[in-house]
Amino acid sequence: MIWANLIMKKNFKKIFISLGGVLTIIILLLPVLSYAARNNPENSDQDAVITKLCTRLTEISSKISQRITDYASKIEAKRTDRSERLIERRNERDARLAKHRAKWDENRTKQFAKLEEKAQTDAQKQAILDFKTTTTEAIKIRRAAVDQAIQNFRQGLNQLILSRKTSTDTIKATFQNAVNSAFGKAQTSCMAGTDPNTVRTTLHASLQTAKEKFNTNRQTIEKIGPQVKSLIDARKAAVKKALDDFKATAEKARADLKTAFPQDIDEESNGETEE
């Protein structure tokens, strides 16, 4: 699970840095756009300069919107891939645990049968029955506790993933809206005949603000490691308690069983030691 979380963090960070990088390039190009419009021989008057700049703004706005859309698609593709791999790993883990439990149950049945062969008196038969009942119930309780710990961990992790998805989508939408708004206002100013330098300066400031807010917001969704660690620690603590409780019950059951037999018996507790 930690590995999956690290991959998640790495992928999102890489994609977000790429988005911010696109905007940085656009910001750096703005002065060039204004200079090119003013110094193009074909643009001999102010109207031509403005027309050229507005046309370039439209082209750039379209390109950056497409780039953001492409990155959003990459995010969604990574989400789908990560979700599929997470489900696959969980299914493999569940199948492996079910297989082990079935094997443990089979071994335990054989062990109980061996114990029953040693019973010579009614008291011994009853002691073995009590031992079987207590051990079987203790295993049932332990497994339920372990299963609940696993379920709680998975639900908690799912919630973190969902929360991160929501935060990511919100940040992306806020970023895209800010960029679209900046270019929209710049294009409106162009059409109104505003001086190209003023248009460029205003657009530069708006895009810089969008980038800074984007970077600030991005930092808020990268720090889920402590939350994942808390889920892992809670799961480990719950599993450990389940095992400790079981061991205490199993040890008492074995002690009670041995009191019914004057000779030593070669019995095993349950055929399984870990989940």
Image (tube, rainbow, N blue to C red):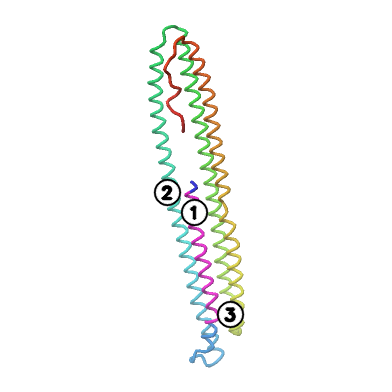
As drawn, 205 above or below 151:
below
Dots 2 and 1: beta carbons under 8 Å?
Answer: no
Label 3 or label 2, whichever comes before in sequence order: 2
Q: Residue furthest front?
A: 264
Quadrant of the rendered image containing residue 167:
bottom right
**What is the tally of numbered marks visible in this picture?**
3
Nearer to us in this view, 93 or 251: 251
Rendering coords of residue 91 (x, y %): 42, 41
Rendering coords of residue 41 (x, y %): 49, 92
| Disc 3 secondary structure class | helix
Label 1 or label 3, whichever comes before in sequence order: 1
Magenta region: which residues? 3-32
Q: Main secondary structure of the magenta part?
A: helix
As drawn, 183 above or below 127:
below
Rendering coords of residue 257 (x, y %): 48, 15
Quadrant of the rendered image containing residue 222:
bottom right
Quadrant of the rendered image containing residue 116:
top left
Determine the residue positioned at 53% across, 70% down.
23
Q: Which residue is mark 1?
A: 8
**Whole-number angstrom distance, CA of label 1 to CA of label 3:** 37 Å
Nearer to us in this view, 154 or 115: 115
| Disc 1 secondary structure class | helix
| Disc 2 secondary structure class | helix
Q: Which residue is mark 3?
A: 200
Q: Which residue is mark 2?
A: 85
Three-letter residue code for mark 1: Met
Q: Residue furthest top?
A: 121
Three-letter residue code for mark 2: Arg
Residue 257 inside the magenta-drawn segment: no
Foreground: disc 1 or disc 3? 1
Image side of residue 227 versus residue 131, left or right? right
